[in-house]
Image (spheres, rainbow, N blue to C red):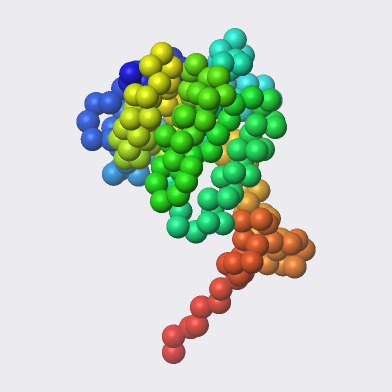
Amino acid sequence: MEATSLSSQFALTRTSNNEFIRNSGLAFPHFLYPHKIPALRRNLLSVKLSSIIADNGGGFRGEKHRLGAKDGVIVVDHGSRRNESNLMLNEFVAMFRERTGYPIVEPAHMELAEPSIKHAFDSCVRQGAKRIIVSPYFLFPGRHWHQDIPQLTAEAAKEHPGVSYMITAPIGLHEQMVDVVNDTINRCLSHVAGDADECVVCSGTDKCRLYETTKHQ
């Protein structure tokens, strides 16, 4: 079975190489033309935000379509040869499970590390899931979202007839990402100034520091 649609508010229709049109009428940018981003931002801020963004600072108004006891969630990232990076996905999934209360949530790596998408899919089914929601932990819809994750998920689903699945949009242009990025910048600046410890991402890497460049004579 192939996933054929996303939530109607965010469905994307492919038109040509990596170029999309939102069913709401918004032009989604061709990834080779970054100069179109400002126009997209203006469009996003001007159309139907009251029906898409919740009053609490961001979030889709879709309570009646929330997950149920027979739904499983797979949060999938790219996967890394660096084990510390892979373990961070486990931490995020634990946070996600605790915050949402969803009973069946599994991590998966698209490649390079275990658990794989297949392993996570099998685990969700063993726990009683009849519908699997695959949520890519990616910022933007590149090849992995268009091709690799759908193929790997379809292969995993073949062993479980009667279980449906869908692949959600990546994180994308969610307005709360502005706060996330800004908070990260402020935290790192505070660490460089000596006013804060390293965050869990930078801890032990010696990456969160100010680099001085040498002036050429």
Q: Camera-side residue: 5 or 13?
A: 5
Residue drawn at (47%, 29%) of the image: 122
Residue that protrudes farthest toward the bottom in the picture: 217
Q: Is residue 39 above or below residue 89?
A: above
Left or right: 195 in relation to 202: right
Q: Is residue 174 above or below residue 26?
A: below
Residue 189 seen in the current view: no
Q: Quadrant of residue 157?
A: top left
Rendering coords of residue 62 (x, y %) = 57, 15
Q: Quadrant of the N terminus?
A: top left
Left or right: 16 in relation to 124: left
Q: Is residue 187 above or below residue 121?
A: below
Rendering coords of residue 83 (x, y %) = 53, 56
Residue drawn at (75%, 61%) of the image: 196
Residue drawn at (60%, 38%) of the image: 93
Residue that protrudes farthest toward the right in the picture: 195
Residue that protrudes farthest toward the left in the picture: 16
Residue drawn at (48%, 83%) of the image: 215
Q: Count of labels shown?
A: 0
Rendering coords of residue 152 (x, y %) = 35, 34
Residue 111 seen in the current view: yes
Q: Quadrant of the C terminus?
A: bottom left
Rendering coords of residue 16 (x, y %) = 22, 31
